[in-house]
Amino acid sequence: MAGVMDWMRAVSRDPRHYQIAILSSLILVGLFVYSFRLPWWHVLACVGSTLGTQALADRFIAKRSFDPRSPLISALSLTLLLRTGSITLSILAGVLAVGSKYVLRWRGKHVFNPANFGLVIVSLIFTSAWISPGQWGAAPVLALFLLGLGGIVTGKAKRWDVSLALLGSYAALLLGRALWLGDPVAIPLHQLQSGALLIFAFFMISDPKTTPDARTGRLIFAALVASVGFAIQFGLHNSAGIILALILCAPTVPLIDHLVGGERYAWPRFIRPTQGDTYVLTPAE
Amino acid sequence: MSSRLLSSVIALSATAVATQASAFCGFYVAKADTDLFNQSSKVAMMRDGERTVITMANDYQGEPEEFAMVIPVPTVITKDQVHISDPALLTHLDAYTAPRLVEYFDDNPCDSHRYRLFDAVPAPVAMESETVTLQKRAEALGVTIEDEFTVGEYDILILSAEESDGLQTWLEEEGYRVPAKARRTLGSYIKQDMKFFVAKVNLEARAENGSEYLRPIAVAFETPKFMLPIRLGTVNAKDDQDLFVYMLTRSGQVETTNYRTQKIPTGQEIPPYVKDEFGDFYKAMFATAADRDGGHGVFMEYAWDMNWCDPCAADPLSNEQLQELGVFWLDSPTDGPAIQPRRGRPIQQAKDVYVTRLHVRYDAKSFPEDLKFKTTGNRDNFQGRYVLRHAYDGEMTCEAASEYKTDVNERRQTEIKTLANLTGWKRDDIRERVEADTGFFDVSKTAPNHKWWSRIWSQD
């Protein structure tokens, strides 16, 4: 019994388990409440391609044992944000997402957020794949729900700071714009209630592996992504501004890490000791 | 139970919903103290890359000399970018994309097939409208008249302004009645570097061309902003407004990016009596769908490849019609192989045009921001389509008849529930109507209920 409790505690320590649970629930909400156009075989293909890529890369490139959790998160994020009628593109996005982790690296850390990389590359190159920023609408209730859940997830991942800093900077920019234009406050509030923005803030940019190691660095990074996203959204009139901003700003992370160093994040890992029946958590790597 | 398609396609024109006239993305400014308010408007938008053509139906119904409108536009517009279009085109586009009713007739369960055919009856759309002159104080007020010209029955001014007070004062001095609350919104557009397209009816030109109605205005421009300004339109609106947007693109469906685009309910079977009140049904169904989302929303009513339709509420638009409407990428109309429609009328050569019809119900509170759009690669076809299934009404003399009648009665019950759910109408009222219309089969005195195994080996 004690073993089960320890195991539960161990499971709850890893932020990825929360993320998998919440992303999966969001997909179900999208399917049943918001009637997303999402055939189950696309989900399967995307999950299959990320897991397959990770398994192959772990075996032949990284030479370590296969862990399905990170690629599963990438697949779920892609499923949530990438809209396409082509199963080939779903698979390609998965391969690009996970592949980027092994190919595009700097000082032992991958540069791009995997799901963000797959999403942006596929939607920029192919017209039959796109991002639907309006698919969640601007439901305040949903926004609160996401805030609550997102808080838990990112709190667990110790990266709630990047989410809040992003939302804070973006909100400040939107409010500033509204003040300058003389627009009613209802307009920036409406823009902030975008479901896509909140999902991005809590479930994409918060990835601890691709954000700067130090808190100061993360705050700088969040403000940078918010500013670039704002510029793309309102200067270039591209509604997916914030998602494009992340891929554009990702290469600055090594620089930020260089300037304000910090301890590198590692996913918690279970080690089952040879004696006794207790699970112990240690930092990975 | 076999049933045979079909017959009637009853298309519902937007006018069935829009009982009262008027509106644009901008606002009407009347010279007299006419109590104007916007209720519904129709806009067709052709977009490929940054090239945009917008055709605005003019359904203003007042004295033409009192008509004037102000629309924010992203760039300066010159005379050759403006075209006066044929109102029949938007009417046709409206009919082609309208929610439709289809009828199926059950076969005699005892034998043969029967078909019936009705014609599509799209309702007509009425159009109507008025003018502007010049002045000098503009400069002093920081208003620049970028261009000034007459096209068709309209006198058009393209204005840019430095600040909203000057623009508002100028418009008022020129005799336009600008809603007081518009000032802030005008200021916002000025800062976003928008220009203002001001149109009035030129009475002489109108008398010359002898047209009774005000024709739609088409404007071509190039801009990265894929949007429709609705904020000025909500300034003088008392109630909810309905906007119908017909988006024509090359690649696929258009959706809103800052509001959620949802689909209207479709494909449901409803009681046959609804055929005579399809307009009421549609209004109630749309209102119920909108209410479930807080009373407002962006609804997709049609999304289809312009090469065909099934069933057709009206023929797809021809290349000539599309060209006139502003579809600018059809320069080589004979390109592409001819494709066969799945059913229905013969069509001409294939064209690279995909149409999305969006129905937006909005007010200032629920839609604080202008509508922003994006073109997606989604080429799935979608239509608002409602099904009437008529039971076989001839004499039935066979064993299968009793089972058929029971099935039909069950079907009617389901249809009643569906209709109540779609429209919010009371089930009892619907049931009364059904009883007065088709009624139910009397199954009490029909043949004894045969066991299922009695049908396996047919009796000799």
Image (cartoon, grey):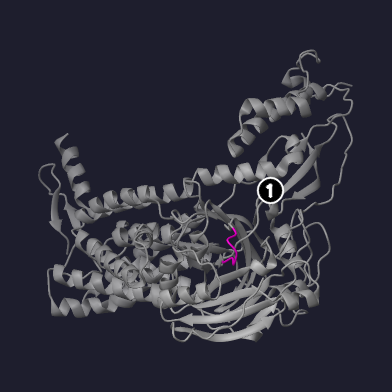
**Segment colored magenta:** B29-34
B14 and B169: which is toward the camera:
B169
**Residue A255, image x, y percentages:** 20, 80
Is residue B30 covered in magenta?
yes
**Residue A263, image x, y percentages:** 12, 68
**Residue B183 shows in this picture:** yes
Is residue B153 covered in magenta?
no
Q: Residue at x 62, y 42 (%)?
A: B284
On the rendered structure, is B200 left or right of B440?
A: left
**Residue B137, image x, y percentages:** 49, 84
Q: Main secondary structure of the magenta part?
A: loop
Q: Is residue A175 above or below residue B223?
A: above
B310 and B122: which is toward the camera:
B122
On the rendered structure, is B276 left or right of B194?
A: right
Q: Residue at x 77, y 56 (%)?
A: B124
Q: Residues within 10 Å of mark 1 (few under 14, many from 20)?
A: many
Q: Amino acid at mark 1?
A: Arg
Which of the chains bears the disc numbered 1? B
**Residue B407 shows in this picture:** no
Q: Quadrant of residue A113?
A: bottom left
Q: Quadrant of residue A7?
A: top left
